[in-house]
Image: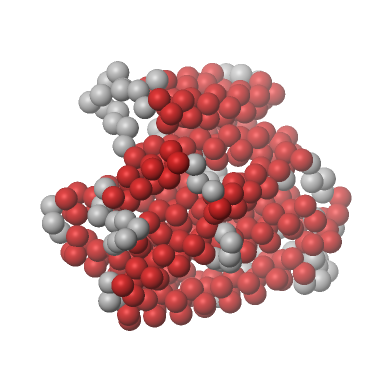
Amino acid sequence: MVEIVFLTPFITGLLAFVLPRTLGRQLLVLTGVVHLVLSLLLWKNRPDAFFSGYFAVTPEGMLSLLVISLLFFLISIYTKTYLEHSNLPSENVFTGFMLLFLSTMTMVTLSDLLSGVLLNCAYLGIFKTNKIMVAAGLQDFSGTILIVFGLISILAAATFILKQNEYKRMLAYSSIENMGIIAFGTGIGGIGVYGAVICMIHHSLIKSSLFLSSGNILMGYKDRLIANTGNMAQHMPKTFVAFFAGFAGISGFPPFGIFIGELFIIVGAFRAGHYVAAGIFIVSMCVIFAGFANQVMKICFAPSAATAPEPARFSEKASLVWPQYILLLTSLILCFFIPDALYQTIVDAVNAIGGGLQ
């Protein structure tokens, strides 16, 4: 079972290179469905790997796999419709590589569309390294490094977001901020680790929704510059709802999960006596929110630039919008209800590096 989860997208990826465009798109969605079903079965049954020396099922690995499978399923549906509108050259090559990357667990289609997942997969390596350091009794050393570099990432993101003029780059710098938050929480330890894992899960869901919405904005306005967008609430109302809700969620508004995760991290920082670091963290969050909100308001409510194309003709098809809604709804549901099995997976991952809810 474990090997099949990884081999399925690898095999379908090879097939996508030689299939016509239409069949390649259908194969992409079908692979997303099969991969999600197999991942759920793997999570429920926890079978042993046939090649146990190469595959190990760990709590943090299972958590990443579940998030990746859900996102890939929803994004494959969005990508199918996006490809129909974009007329991408060598589309079969794009689809093939997308599936092959999924099989290696880096899981990228376009780096901007899936940065919410790609960054979390990269951070999994840091998480595992910190797990080894904690087991060796070096948690203070590794914790200090994570706190310092986490704050540096947050401050760097705050600096660039304030003057950013492209909405996709703005979302990318927001991802840097969120990785800094997760690193800071992991370094704090205790309840901060739990907050970091919560932020990691909700960041994947919400940020992927934002990048999908930004794809709609690009198709509607034909421009990446914030100055050449505007009044999206009127021109693209369905995308506006998803984009603005995603902004509220990623900025840490209650009741979204990132608010809960950041609250745990701040409480953990004060409990551990990191008062200065907590102060820098809180001030940086306020600065980033101010810069982010300023740009989002321009996109959503400011009058459209005179040189910007009329986006009202853009058809907001259901498959270009409802994946974002499902991602945001999933994030909201997880704020109020976490299934016992998923909760236990999170707790096991947190306990592995010395964190906890106490």
Q: Is residue 29 above or below residue 160?
A: above
x, y percentage for residue 143?
A: 24, 63
Q: As displayed, is residue 200 above or below residue 153?
A: above
Q: Nearer the viewer, residue 108 or 239?
A: 239
Q: Is residue 111 visible?
A: no
Q: Is residue 24 left or right of residue 191?
A: right
* Quarter where residue 247 is shown: bottom right
Q: Which quadrant, please, contains the N terminus?
A: top left
Residue at x 49%, y 62% (from the top left corner):
260
Indicate the position of residue 318 as horizontal and vertical percent values.
Answer: 76, 40
Residue visible at 34% across and 40% down in the picture: 59
Q: Residue furthest left?
A: 136
Image position, residue 60 (x, y; %): 35, 43
| 35 relative to 241 in the view: left or right | left
The tally of labels here is: 0
User: Which residue is depicted at the point 78% across and 41% down?
Assistant: 317
Classify 19 as above or below 44.
above
Q: Is 340 in front, or is 2? A: 340
Percent coordinates x, y for residue 105 in the rendering: 41, 36
Residue 10 in the image: above or below residue 166: above
Between 36 and 22, the one lying in front of the other is 36
Q: Is residue 312 visible in the rendered structure shown here?
A: yes
Which colouring convention does the figure follow? Answer: secondary structure
Q: State left or right for residue 318 relative to residue 32.
A: right
**Quadrant of the drawing holding the C terminus:** bottom left
Residue found 51% across the figure and 53% down from its top: 202
